[in-house]
Every structure is written in C-alpha cells, then in structure tokens.
Amino acid sequence: MTRLEEYVAGLATLSPAQLRAEWRRVHKGQMMPDGLGRDLATRALAWRAQERVQGGLLPADRRELVRLAKQLGDTGEIELAAPISLKPGTKLVRRWHERLYQVLVLDEGFQFENRHYRSLTPIAREITGAAWSGPRFFGLAEKSHGKPA
C-alpha cells in the first residue's frame, strides 16, 4: 500500500476531533465548515491528498467548474455543454435561400451588415424571419432533442 492509500484509509479511523484537527492542518488553520458531514470531510481531505501527489485539475477545468458553480447559483440550473468560444476576427458564413451571409466576430458581439449585435440570435432572426437559435443557425450548436438549443 502506498503512503497515499494509507493516509486515505486512515481518515476513516479518525475521531471527529481528530478529523477537525486534520482539516485545520491540511487547510492551513481554517476551521472545518459547520454542517460538513464526516463522509464529505473525509472525501475532501482524500481529494486534497491525491491532488498533492498526482496533481490537481487543469486550469481550464477549474475555470469550467467556476463557470458551472456561478451558473447554478444564478439560475438554479447548469448547462453542461461548454459555450462556444469564437476568436475576434472569425467570419461565420451561412447560405440561406441561395444568398450568402457573413457575420464578423468582434471582441464583444458580432457585426452583420455594418450593424453591431450582442448575440447571433437576432441576426438569425433577421436573415430567416423566424425564431431561430443563432448558434444553431450558424452551425455552432447541435439540434437538441426536446431541449432549447
């Protein structure tokens, strides 16, 4: 058994007071949060130990978790599909009824026919005359089955 495995196994044998002391040691003096049950505290300490030995999350994964936590706090729901990230200067091209349409991606928003838009949806609506999802219209999102795109 490795030292990490021994440490993780040993967490289950700690008394509540020992578990709180270990939490303070690992988290540099911070008290264990009130209401944090034994199981979750043990898992959190095991995670931290594994993170030290095997490395933590990649920065992109950390940012995605922060984004999801904020979204959950704001709306009570999370959208697991990561948003499309388009670089400024990218041109989106779509042929609709034999006419070619081009949209320029800006730092903040989009330019279509010399007008600025905050999102693609009003552009898609203007082109089609119907209520389209802008990202879906321009091929940036897949058709969702029964869920809004």
Image (cartoon, rainbow, N blue to C red):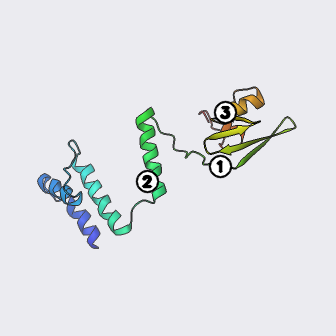
Instruction: Check disc 2: other Cα within 10 Å, few if <14, some if 14-19, many if 20+.
Output: few
| Nearer to us: label 1 or label 3 | 1
Whole-Å distance between the Cαs marked 1 and 3?
18 Å
Q: Which residue is mark 1?
A: 88
- Number of numbered discs overlaid on the protein picture: 3
Relative placement, left or right, of 129 versus 83 is right
- Image coordinates of residue 64 in percent, x first then y, are 47, 49
Q: Quadrant of residue 10?
A: bottom left
Relative placement, left or right, of 26 versus 131 is left
Q: Residue at x 46, y 35 (%)?
A: 77
Q: In the depicted view, which residue is nearer to us: 97 or 105?
A: 105
Amino acid type, mark 3: Thr
| Nearer to us: label 1 or label 2 | 1
Amino acid type, mark 2: Arg
Q: In the depicted view, which residue is nearer to us: 21 or 106?
A: 106
Whole-Å distance between the Cαs marked 2 and 3?
29 Å
Relative placement, left or right, of 9 versus 119 is left
Q: Quadrant of residue 101?
A: top right
Residue closest to the far front? 114
Whole-Å distance between the Cαs marked 1 and 2?
24 Å
- Image coordinates of residue 74 in percent, x first then y, are 43, 34
Q: Quadrant of residue 118?
A: top right
Q: In the rendered view, would you say 86 is above or below 136?
A: below
Tag 2's secondary structure? helix
Tag 3's secondary structure? helix
Q: Earlier in the sequence, mark 2 or mark 3?
A: 2
Amino acid type, mark 1: Pro
Quarter of the image that includes the N terminus? bottom left
Give residue 62's mark.
2
